[in-house]
Image: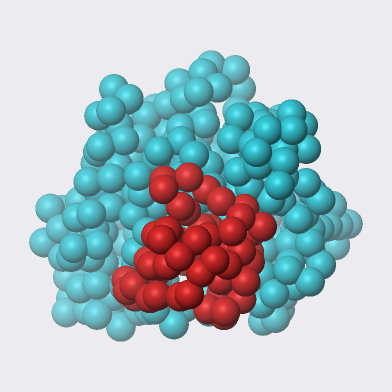
Chain colours: A cyan, B red
């Protein structure tokens, strides 16, 4: 199999584009996809510092690699979730990546902050681990971004993540979540750091291929707490569709983004309140994170 | 050929030579959800893997 552009031996076949690329042409293609995402969604302004949330998995490390190579000023943020060996290996991958490229990295540990990791917090509060983890991550991303003066937080969510989330939201008719599902989440006039997902056009297979071709070491093991998560089933179903009809995932998600404004016309939202405890924007007196922490303290 | 698999980590043996696509098919693995690596290089699905080769089949799906 040969590269469609330069005729050299191909490194990856891409049925969704009816093509194959060699190592160099693939890197060029992938960078262009990320730059298109950033430009189409107006994610960053030139020179704006970006806080990159890095887990140690392929997506966030590839995102960081591309942002650096495209000349964006970045700082990495790693949250150690306190999930035993998995968290230890994840942090080691992030530190190795940052050290080898002389990059600034902020590491925050739940264990150091509370003496408890995500597993303990989920147990103490009887919340599903992925739900408690998501609540905690969102809080800390926003808190650290605001404290350190970053207006933008970039995460490694990819096309498969977004398409699977969309499928889940549709299957369960989660209208409030559908309204909010976008590659850019507003900063609501500076109340939050803006959340952006520059990899939303790229499937996991292409991101993992980029990691292999660029010698980016990442944690291959899955989070032990995510066993049985519905996301995996949705991704598997979408991949079966993709194999039979290449391009389905991108069409599904981009179609949603195109139709979203007419399906959910802009509404004037009720004024967001501030959490009485931490001051972050929320819908009630206390934000989800502070309610979680209160329940840990009470138990 | 020796094949390194993940989730859970294990090794299996298959008789070669075989193209990558038929190895994935034989093992019941989705080509959309896996990469195949031979001697630290990505290989495409038409690449023929010989009996002496050692390959890694790496899953690409993560929890999100």
Depth check, front residue: A219 or A130: A219
- How many numbered marks have been drawn onto this rendered protein structure? 0
Question: Looking at the rendering, which quadrant does residue A259 occupy?
Answer: bottom right
Considering only vertical position in the picture, is A287 above or below A67? below
Residue located at (61% from left, 64% from top): B19
Camera sees residue A186: no
Considering only vertical position in the picture, is A130 above or below A41? below
Q: Is residue A181 left or right of residue A192?
A: right
Question: Looking at the rendering, which quadrant does residue A111 occupy?
Answer: bottom left
Camera sees residue A173: yes
Residue located at (25% from left, 37% from top): A96
Quadrant of the frame with the C terminus of chain A = bottom left
Question: Looking at the rendering, which quadrant does residue A148 occupy?
Answer: top left
Q: Position of residue B56 (x, y in %)?
A: 42, 60
Q: Is residue A118 left or right of residue A138?
A: left
Residue located at (49% from left, 39% from top): A213
Depth check, front residue: A100 or A181: A100
Residue located at (22% from left, 79% from top): A124
Q: Position of residue A206 (x, y in %)?
A: 60, 49
Q: Position of residue A72 (x, y in %)?
A: 51, 22
Q: Position of residue A289 (x, y in %)?
A: 35, 62
């Amino acid at each position: 199999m040969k590269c469609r552009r330069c005729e050299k031996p191909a490194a990856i076949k891409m049925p969704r584009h009816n093509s194959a690329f060699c190592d160099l042409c693939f890197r060029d293609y992938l960078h262009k996809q990320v730059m298109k995402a950033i430009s189409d969604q107006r994610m960053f302004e030139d020179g704006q510092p970006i806080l990159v949330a890095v887990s140690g998995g392929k997506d966030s490390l590839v995102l960081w690699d591309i942002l650096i190579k495209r000349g964006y000023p970045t700082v990495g943020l790693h949250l150690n979730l306190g999930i035993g060996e998995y968290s230890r290996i994840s942090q080691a991958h992030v530190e190795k990546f940052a050290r080898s490229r002389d990059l600034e990295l902020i590491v925050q540990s739940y264990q150091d902050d509370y003496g408890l990791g995500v597993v303990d917090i989920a147990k103490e509060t009887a919340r599903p681990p992925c739900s408690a983890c998501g609540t905690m991550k969102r809080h800390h991303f926003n808190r650290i971004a605001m404290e350190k003066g970053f207006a933008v937080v970039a995460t490694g969510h990819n096309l498969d993540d977004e398409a699977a989330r969309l499928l889940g939201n549709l299957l369960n008719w989660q209208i409030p979540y559908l309204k909010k599902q976008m590659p850019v989440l507003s900063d609501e006039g500076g109340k939050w750091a803006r959340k952006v997902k520059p990899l939303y056009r790229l499937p996991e297979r292409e991101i993992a291929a980029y990691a292999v071709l660029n010698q980016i070491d990442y944690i291959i093991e899955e989070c032990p707490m995510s066993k049985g998560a519905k996301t995996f089933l949705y991704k598997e179903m979408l991949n079966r569709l993709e194999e039979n009809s290449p391009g389905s995932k991108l069409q599904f998600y981009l179609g949603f983004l195109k139709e979203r404004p007419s399906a959910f016309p802009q509404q004037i939202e009720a004024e967001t309140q501030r959490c009485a405890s931490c001051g972050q924007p929320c819908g009630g007196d206390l934000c989800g994170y502070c309610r979680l922490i209160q329940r840990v303290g009470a138990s | 050929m020796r094949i390194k698999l993940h989730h859970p980590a294990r090794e299996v043996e298959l008789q070669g030579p075989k193209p990558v696509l038929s190895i994935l098919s034989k093992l019941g693995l989705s080509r959309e959800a896996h990469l195949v690596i031979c001697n630290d290089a990505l290989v495409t699905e038409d690449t023929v893997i010989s009996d002496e080769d050692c390959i890694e089949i790496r899953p690409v799906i993560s929890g999100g």
